[in-house]
Image (tube, grey):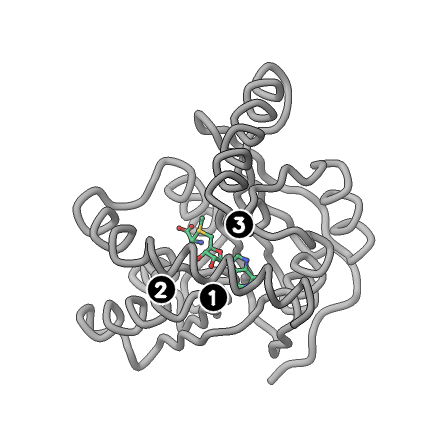
Amino acid sequence: MTSDSVQTREIAETFDDLAHDRCCKYKSKGLTASTEVLLGFLTENGLVGKTVLDLGCGTGFFALETLREGASSIKGVDLSSAAIHEANEFAKESGLQDRARFEVANAASSQHVSFDIVVMGKVLCCYPDADSLLKTASASSNGILGFVVPRDEGLMKPLMRVGTGLINLVERLRKTGFRLYLHPLRSLDRLLVDNGFQQSNKARSRFWLVFLYKRTGPGAAVQG
Ligand SMILES: C[S@@+](CC[C@H](N)C(=O)[O-])C[C@H]1O[C@@H](n2cnc3c(N)ncnc32)[C@H](O)[C@@H]1O
């Protein structure tokens, strides 16, 4: 087994264990502050009638919220089969299953037809290869790309570095392969600009940054 497949298996197992609790938390508390901001950015920029791809969708609640706000259809992919199971159950419970598709896949190596909107909520920080995730995301988006990453800038930067170091130390002591990653924000921006996107919105919550990019240049995926 390659180190890449060991890593993706470890991520999947970590989120398999968390899937049920994450679903219950959403059902009792709703969206977190940062995902609420991301949803706000999408609605402000026109969500009605749009197709949405959620890479690293977890238990699917964000994608299902976009359907409630008027998106025409959504697709979600995640490494965790337990999360995808919860997402499919939740779609059925909500009566949205006809417009929602959830699949187990590695977003860093999957290919998708073109979507109007692609989102990645708190996914880049769980995966070592940010470039591959962003390449999939930008190749799959015809219009908008939104994502949430740790607030690794300004006065929060040292705190984020220490917090991430401590979490990774605990994971190392527990002998798991799961790690958190603080990918440099400047490299994320450069990659998106090179792929035809420009930043249009940015907001902060306590621990997270929410970004929205819009396609301004060529490179859109093929319409399916
Ligand atoms: C912190 S959770 C966030 C879930 C959801 N996006 C949200 O906003 O609540 C990160 C999710 O990303 C998924 N993930 C990480 N790397 C991935 C990859 N390469 N492909 C697909 N899913 C991935 C994990 O399995 C996990 O469900």
Closer to viewer: mark 1 or mark 3 = 3
Q: How far apart are marks 2 and 3 (CA)?
A: 17 Å
Under 8 Å from ligand 1: the CB of mark 2? yes
**Identity of the residue drawn at 67% across and 42% down:** 199
* Quarter of the picture holding the C terminus: bottom right
Residue 179 occupies which quadrant of the picture? top right
- Which residue: 53% across, 54% down? 120
Sequence-first disc among 2 and 3:
2
Q: Which amino acid does label 2 sit on?
A: Ala
Q: Where is residue 180 in the image (x, y as percent from the top left)?
A: 56, 42
N-terminal-most mark, 1 or 3: 1
Q: How far apart are the alpha carbons under marks 1 and 3?
A: 15 Å
Residue behind mark 1: 78
- The reply to whether dot 1 and dot 3 touch (C-beta < 8 Å) is no
The amino acid sitting under disc 1 is: Asp
Q: In this view, does 48 lie above or below 146?
A: below
User: Residue at coordinates 64% horizontally, 81% vertically from top-left?
Assistant: 223
The residue carrying mark 3 is 178
Q: Mark 2 points at which residue?
A: 83
The local secondary structure at tag 1 comes to strand
Mark 1 CB in 8 Å range of ligand 1? Answer: yes
At numbered mark 3, what does the secondary structure look like: helix, strand or loop? loop
Across and down, in percent, residue 189 comes to 73, 43
Q: Check disc 2 and report its element: helix, strand or loop.
A: helix
